[in-house]
C-alpha cells in the first residue's frame, strides 16, 4: 500500500493555527498570507488557500472568485508598500499540490527583471532578513492588508 504523504502547506497552516509560524502575516476569509523566504524580492509573500485543494477548477466557483480577490488585494497591499516595477504571480503546485500563490514584487534595479524569478540562483534569492527588519516588514504588510481587507486577522483563531 502506498504511504500517504503529508501536505507541507497544510502543516504550515496547522503551525499558523498553533501560533508557531514565525513568518505568518494574516489570516483572511479564504487564505493565509505568509512572508516568503526570498526577500531579494522585498515584500515577497505566499498566499495559501485555507482549504486543501489541488486545482483551481476543483474549487466551488464562488470560493475561487473570493480567493482570487484576496490575491488581488494582497498584491495591491504589497505594491503600495514596496512600489515595484511589476508584480509576478505564480500558482504552480508542482512541488506542493495545495493551491497557493507566490507574489513576487519585481524591481527595475533587478538586472534579471524580464525573466522568471527562478532565473536568479536560489542562493541569491533566499535572503534572510534580520529580526527587526522582518518584524517591521510584517507589521507594515499587516497595516496595508487590513486597509483593504478589514476582516483580516493577525493571530490564530
Image (cartoon, grey):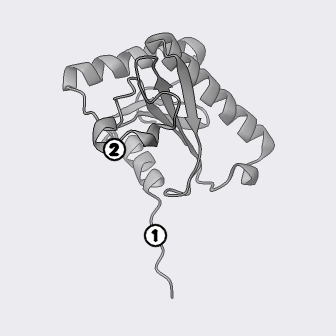
Q: Visible in this render: residue 151? A: no
- Residue beneath label 1, please? 5
Residue at 51% x, 38% y: name it.
Answer: 116
Secondary structure of residue under mark 2: helix
137 vs 47, left or right, is left
Residue 124 bears which disc, if any?
A: none
Mark 1 element type? loop
Q: Is residue 137 visible?
A: yes
Q: Are the residues at dot 1 and dot 2 in contact (C-beta closer than 8 Å)? A: no
Task: Compare residues 156 and 104 and report the one nearer the observer.
Answer: 104
Residue 122, disc: 2
- At a point 34% along the width and 30% down the height, the residue shown is 39
First-in-chain label (1 vs 2): 1
The relative height of residue 59 versus residue 81 in the rendered view (above or below) is below
Q: Nearer the viewer, mark 1 or mark 2?
A: 2
Q: CA distance from mark 1 to mark 2?
A: 25 Å
Q: Pick the residue in front: 51 or 74.
A: 74
User: Residue 59 vs residue 113: left or right?
Assistant: right
105 vs 53: above or below: above
Give the residue displayed 58% in from the left and 34% down from the top. Answer: 89
Q: Is residue 90 left or right of residue 3?
A: right
Front in this rendered view, residue 34 or 149: 34
The outermost residue toward the bottom is 1
Q: Is residue 62 above or below residue 9?
A: above
Q: For residue 137, what is the image quadrant?
A: top left
Quick check: 4 above or below 47? below
Amino acid at each position: 500500500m502506498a504511504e500517504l504523504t503529508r501536505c507541507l502547506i497544510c502543516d504550515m497552516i496547522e503551525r499558523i493555527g498553533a501560533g508557531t509560524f514565525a513568518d505568518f502575516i494574516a489570516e483572511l476569509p479564504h487564505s493565509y498570507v505568509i512572508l516568503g523566504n526570498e526577500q531579494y524580492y522585498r515584500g515577497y509573500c505566499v498566499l495559501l488557500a485555507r482549504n486543501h485543494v489541488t486545482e483551481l477548477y476543483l474549487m466551488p466557483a464562488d470560493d475561487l472568485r473570493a480567493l482570487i480577490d484576496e490575491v488581488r488585494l494582497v498584491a495591491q497591499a504589497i505594491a503600495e508598500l514596496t512600489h515595484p516595477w511589476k508584480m509576478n504571480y505564480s500558482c504552480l503546485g508542482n512541488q506542493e499540490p495545495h493551491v497557493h500563490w507566490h507574489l513576487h514584487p519585481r524591481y527595475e534595479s533587478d538586472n534579471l527583471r524580464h525573466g522568471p524569478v527562478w532565473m536568479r540562483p536560489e542562493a541569491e534569492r533566499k535572503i534572510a532578513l534580520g529580526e527587526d527588519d522582518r518584524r517591521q516588514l510584517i507589521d507594515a504588510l499587516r497595516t496595508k492588508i487590513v486597509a483593504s481587507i478589514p476582516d483580516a486577522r493577525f493571530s490564530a483563531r
